[in-house]
Image (spheres, helix red, strand yellow):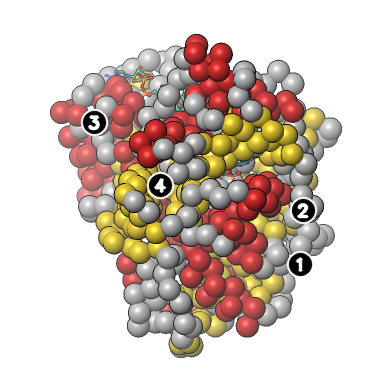
C-alpha cells in the first residue's frame, strides 16, 4: 500500500501573534514553526503503521517554499520514505488542493491522508477539495482506521456522536485525535532523513479564490472580577444580572 | 440569484446549528434583496419549520429515504439543487459533515470557500467576511473573488431568529447513484446536550485529582443544565470520555458560559474555549494563567467551592 500524507507548517501555538503592513500581513518574525500536529501525530503515524503491517511506503507532500524543508525532513526522520515539495506559496486552500491532486494523479496512491485541520487558519477545506478533484470518497475526522484487504473500516467523530463506515478501494482521509499515538524521531531516523529523496516540483496553474484583507487582535478582556469563595449567591447573581448568561 | 442553505438533519432531526444556518442565510439574502432557499436531504422533522427562520422555499430531497452520509452523494445533490435554483451563495454549518462537503462543493461549483465564519458578510464593497484564526488569538477578514461563494457558519455565532411562519416544503427526488461509503452505524452520545451545541458548559481539569471526584462537577452541570467538558490530561487519563476534550487538539467551542474548574489555562486549552462569551474560573492558585482570560474568578479549593455554587444555583432556580 502506498500512502500520500499531506503536511503543512503552522506557527507553534505558544507563539505570540502579530501583524505587519497595516495589519494586512502575518508577522512571522521570531515565530517558531512546527509541522501541523494532526498531520504529524495522527495522519503520518497511522500511515506508517499501515505500511509497516501491509508493505508499501509513505510519501509526504507539502505545498510551500524552501523554508518548509525543515518540517519535511522531520517527517522523513519520523519514517516517511520520500517527499515532494511543490515550490509555491500556498495562497489559499484551493491552490494547495489543486497542487496536491496534480501530484497524486500522476501516481497511484491507495490512500491520501491529511490532518483534520491546520491549527493556524482552522480551514478544514483542503481534504474535501483534494477528494473532489480526484473523484474519490472522503472520510473526515477519522479517529480509527482498520484495513483488511481492500476494505477500510472507519470511525468518524461527529458532533455528539460517532459514525462507523466502510470504504472499498482508494479514498482520502482527514485525521483526528485517536487515530494513532505520536512518534518521536530517533537519532537514526534523523540521520537517515538526510539522504532520503525530497523532490521539488513546479506548481500547476491554479488561481487563489480567497484572500485575507486584514487582521485584528480581539479586544482584551476587561479584567477578571473576583468573587468571594464564601458567597456563591453573588456569583450566580452576577451571571444572571450582569453577564445575562443564566 | 439566491442564497442556498443546506440544513443538516442528523438522525432525522434539525439541531440548533441548522436553525443558525437558516437564520444566517435569510439575513444574507435580505441584505442582497433576494430569497433564501433551504435544502434538506433524507429523513427529517417537518422541513417547513425552516420558514420560521426566514427561509422562503424549502426543497426536501428524497424525503422518505434514509440517505446515509457520503460526501460525494451529498455534494451532487446540493450542487444540482443550487444550480437549479439560481444559487450564488451557499451556506452550510461548520460541522464534521458540513466541512466534508463544503470543500467538494467549492471545487464542483468553482466557488471560493471560507469555513468557520462567525460574522455576517459585508457585501457593500465586494464580499468580505470574518472568522477567528490562530487559535482565537486573531480575527481575519477574508474576501472571495469568485462569483459563487461558499461559507460554513461556526456554531453559536448567530442566534436563531424567528421571522416568518411554517411553509410547505417542495419534495423532489434525485437519484443518488451508488454509495461508495457504506455507513454501518451512527452512535449518538448518551443524554444531555452535545458539547459543540451547548450554550452552557462546565469543564474540569487535573485539579479534580481523579475520576472518583467527578460527582460534584456532574451535580453542578445538572443544576445549571450545562454540558460537560474537560482538559486534555483528564481525557488522556480516561477520567472523562475523549469527546469531552476541548482545546487545540480537541474540539473548539463557543458557549455563552464556560466554567473552568481546576484547569490551569494553558494556551492550548484556551485555543478551544477563548471564544466563549463569559468565562468563570475556579482555581486555588491565584496565579493560574486562566484568570487572565476570565470574566469572573473564584480563588479557592474546588472541593469546597463547587458544592456551594451548586447549592446557590439551586436556590436561584427555585426563585426564578
Ligand atoms: C501541542 C499541544 C497540544 C495540546 N492540546 C491541548 C488541548 O487541546 N486541550 C488541553 O486542555 N490541553 C492541551 N494541551 C496540554 C496543555 O498544554 C496543558 O498541559 C493542559 O491543558 C493542562 O491541563 P489542566 O489545566 O487540567 O492541568 P494542570 O496544568 O495540571 O492544572 C491543574 C490546575 O488545577 C488547579 N487545582 C489543583 N487542585 C485544585 C483544587 N483543589 N481546587 C482548585 N484548583 C485546583 C491548579 O492550581 C492548576 O491550575 C496541549 C499541549 C500541547 C503541547
Ligand atoms: N501547504 C500545504 N501543503 C500540504 N498539505 C497541506 C497544506 N496545507 C494544508 N495541508 C493539509 O490539509 C490539511 C487541512 O488543512 P486546512 O484545510 O488548511 O485546515 C492539513 O492538516 C494538511 O494535511
Tell me which residue sits at (23%, 53%) in the image. B191
Tell me which residue sits at (76%, 49%) in the image. A204
- On screen, residue B273 versus residue B31, left or right, reads left
Q: Are marks 1 and 4 on the same chain?
A: no
Tag 4 near tag 2, CB within 8 Å? no
| Residues at marks 4 and 3, CA–CA distance in whole angstroms | 22 Å
Q: Chain of mark 1?
A: B
| Residues at marks 1 and 3, CA–CA distance in whole angstroms | 49 Å
Q: Are marks 2 and 3 on the same chain?
A: no
Q: Element type at marker 1?
A: loop
Q: Chain of mark 3?
A: B
Residue A194 spot, x, y in % from top left: 62, 18
Location of mark 3 (residue) = B239
Tag 1 near tag 2, CB within 8 Å? no
Q: Chain of mark 2?
A: A
Residue B49 spot, x, y in % from top left: 43, 78
Q: Quadrant of the N terminus of chain B?
A: bottom right
Image depth: mark 2 or mark 3 in front: 2
Q: Is mark 2 within 8 Å of ligand 2?
A: no
Location of mark 1 (residue) = B147
Q: Chain of mark 4?
A: A
Q: Is mark 3 within 8 Å of ligand 1?
A: no
Q: Element type at marker 4?
A: strand
Residue A64 spot, x, y in % from top left: 71, 36
Q: Is mark 4 within 8 Å of ligand 2?
A: no
Report crowding for label 4: few under 14, some 14 to 19, many 20 or more residues within 10 A (C-alpha).
Answer: many
Q: Earlier in the sequence, mark 1 or mark 3?
A: 1
Location of mark 2 (residue) = A206
Name the one closer to the observer, B35 or B83: B83
Amino acid at each position: 500500500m502506498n500512502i500520500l500524507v499531506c503536511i503543512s507548517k503552522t506557527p507553534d501555538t505558544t507563539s505570540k501573534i502579530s501583524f505587519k503592513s497595516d495589519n494586512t500581513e502575518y508577522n512571522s518574525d521570531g515565530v517558531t514553526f512546527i509541522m501541523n500536529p494532526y498531520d504529524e501525530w495522527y495522519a503520518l503515524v497511522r500511515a506508517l503503521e499501515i505500511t509497516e503491517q501491509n508493505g508499501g511506503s509513505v510519501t509526504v507532500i507539502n505545498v510551500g517554499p524552501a523554508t518548509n524543508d525543515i518540517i519535511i525532513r522531520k517527517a522523513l526522520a519520523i519514517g516517511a520514505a520520500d517527499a515532494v515539495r511543490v515550490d509555491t506559496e500556498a495562497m489559499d486552500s484551493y491552490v494547495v488542493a489543486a497542487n496536491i491532486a496534480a501530484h497524486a494523479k500522476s501516481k497511484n496512491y491507495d490512500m491520501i491522508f491529511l490532518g483534520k485541520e491546520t491549527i493556524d487558519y482552522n480551514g478544514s477545506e483542503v481534504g474535501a477539495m483534494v477528494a473532489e478533484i480526484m473523484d474519490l470518497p472522503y472520510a473526515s475526522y477519522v479517529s480509527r482506521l482498520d484495513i483488511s484487504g481492500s476494505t477500510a473500516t472507519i470511525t468518524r467523530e461527529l458532533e455528539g456522536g460517532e459514525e462507523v463506515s466502510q470504504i472499498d478501494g482508494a479514498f482520502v482521509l482527514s485525521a483526528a485525535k485517536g487515530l494513532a499515538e505520536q512518534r518521536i524521531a530517533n537519532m537514526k531516523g534523523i540521520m537517515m532523513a538526510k539522504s532520503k529523496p525530497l523532490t521539488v516540483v513546479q506548481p500547476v496553474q491554479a488561481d487563489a479564490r480567497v484572500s485575507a484583507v486584514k487582521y485584528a487582535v480581539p479586544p482584551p478582556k476587561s479584567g477578571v472580577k473576583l468573587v468571594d469563595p464564601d458567597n456563591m449567591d453573588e456569583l450566580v447573581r452576577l451571571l444572571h444580572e450582569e453577564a445575562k448568561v443564566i | 440569484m439566491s442564497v442556498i442553505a443546506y440544513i443538516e438533519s442528523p438522525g432525522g432531526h434539525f439541531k440548533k446549528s441548522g436553525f443558525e444556518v437558516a437564520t444566517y442565510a435569510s439575513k444574507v439574502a435580505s441584505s442582497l434583496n433576494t430569497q433564501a432557499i433551504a435544502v434538506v436531504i433524507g429523513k427529517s422533522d417537518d422541513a417547513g419549520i425552516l420558514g420560521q427562520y426566514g427561509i422562503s422555499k424549502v426543497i426536501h430531497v428524497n424525503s422518505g429515504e434514509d440517505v446515509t452520509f457520503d460526501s460525494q452523494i451529498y455534494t451532487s445533490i446540493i450542487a444540482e439543487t443550487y444550480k437549479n435554483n439560481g444559487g450564488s451563495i451557499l451556506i452550510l454549518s461548520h460541522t464534521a459533515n458540513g466541512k466534508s462537503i463544503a470543500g467538494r462543493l467549492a471545487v464542483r461549483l468553482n466557488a471560493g470557500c471560507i469555513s468557520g465564519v462567525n460574522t455576517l458578510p459585508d457585501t457593500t464593497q465586494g464580499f468580505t467576511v470574518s472568522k477567528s484564526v490562530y487559535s482565537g488569538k486573531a480575527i481575519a477578514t477574508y474576501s472571495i473573488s469568485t462569483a459563487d461563494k461558499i461559507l460554513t457558519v461556526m456554531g453559536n455565532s448567530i442566534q436563531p431568529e424567528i421571522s416568518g411562519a411554517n411553509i410547505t416544503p417542495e419534495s423532489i427526488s434525485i437519484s443518488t447513484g451508488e454509495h461508495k461509503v457504506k455507513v454501518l452505524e451512527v452512535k449518538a452520545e448518551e443524554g444531555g446536550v452535545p458539547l459543540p451545541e451547548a450554550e452552557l458548559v462546565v469543564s474540569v481539569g487535573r485539579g479534580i485529582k481523579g475520576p472518583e471526584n467527578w460527582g460534584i462537577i456532574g451535580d453542578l452541570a445538572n443544576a445549571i443544565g450545562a454540558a460537560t467538558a474537560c482538559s486534555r490530561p483528564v481525557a488522556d487519563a480516561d477520567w472523562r470520555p475523549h469527546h469531552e476534550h476541548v482545546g487545540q487538539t480537541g474540539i473548539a467551542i463557543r458557549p455563552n458560559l464556560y466554567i473552568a474548574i481546576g484547569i490551569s489555562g494553558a494556551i492550548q486549552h484556551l485555543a478551544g474555549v477563548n471564544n466563549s462569551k463569559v468565562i468563570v474560573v475556579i482555581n486555588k492558585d491565584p496565579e493560574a494563567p486562566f484568570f487572565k482570560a476570565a470574566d469572573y474568578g473564584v480563588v479557592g479549593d474546588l472541593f469546597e467551592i463547587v458544592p456551594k455554587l451548586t447549592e446557590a444555583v439551586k436556590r436561584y432556580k427555585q426563585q426564578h
